[in-house]
Amino acid sequence: MRFFPSLGFPKLLILSGVFLFLIYTGLISLVAFGGMKYLAKKDREWTEQIQQHHMLQQTFLEEMNRDEPNFSGFSTKTKIALFNTWLLKRETK
């Protein structure tokens, strides 16, 4: 008594397993590369935002050094607070 009625059954099972493995591998690759594209796009956006923020900081420092002679003696917390206030005023104009 044979367990498999025909010889084609094990081959079909193996081929369907290989086919499913290839499909899953392809889907995983699509998700991984799609995620990488998304992260690369976000990285460019974040880099642009950081560069813009640095330019604003540079503008602020130039204005403060010109307008306030003792600015270099201020503490870091004071400088950050002044920058945030300056930035809020600039954005609300």
Image: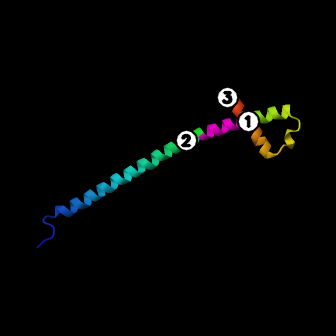
Residue 89 on the magenta span: no
Residue 69 vs 13, above or below: the answer is above
**Residue in front for this viewpoint, 13 or 86:** 86
Instruction: Calculate the distance from the C-alpha at mark 3 to the C-alpha at mark 2.
Output: 26 Å
Badge 1 is on which residue? 85
The correct choice, above or below, for 28 with respect to 41 in the image is: below
Considering only vertical position in the picture, is 8 above or below 85? below
Query: Callout 3: helix, strand or loop?
Result: helix
In this view, the residue farthest toward the top is 93
Instruction: Measuring from the top left, give residue 74's x and y in whole percent.
Output: 84, 43
- What secondary structure is found at the residue carrying circle 1? helix
Q: Relative to 13, say whether 31 is above or below.
A: above
Tag of residue 45: none
Q: Callout 3 environment at 10 Å: few (<14), some (14 to 19), or many (20+)?
A: few
- Residues shaded magenta: 46-56
In this view, the residue farthest toward the bottom is 1
Q: Which residue is mark 3?
A: 92
Question: In the rendered image, which quarter contains the C terminus?
Answer: top right
Label of residue 42 in the image = 2
Label 1 Cα neighbours within 10 Å, binned few <14 / some 14-19 / many ≥20: few
Query: Mark 3 or 2 closer to N-term?
Result: 2
Disc 3 or disc 2, which is closer to the eye? 3
Query: Is 10 situated left or right of 58 in this image?
Result: left
Q: Residue at x 71, y 30 (%)?
A: 89
Q: Position of residue 57 (x, y in %)?
A: 74, 37
Say if mark 2 contacts mark 1, CB within 8 Å: no
- Which three-letter amino acid code belongs to the residue tagged 2? Lys
Question: What is the quadrant of residue 91 in the picture?
Answer: top right
Q: Position of residue 28 (x, y in %)?
A: 40, 52
Left or right of 74? Residue 22 is left
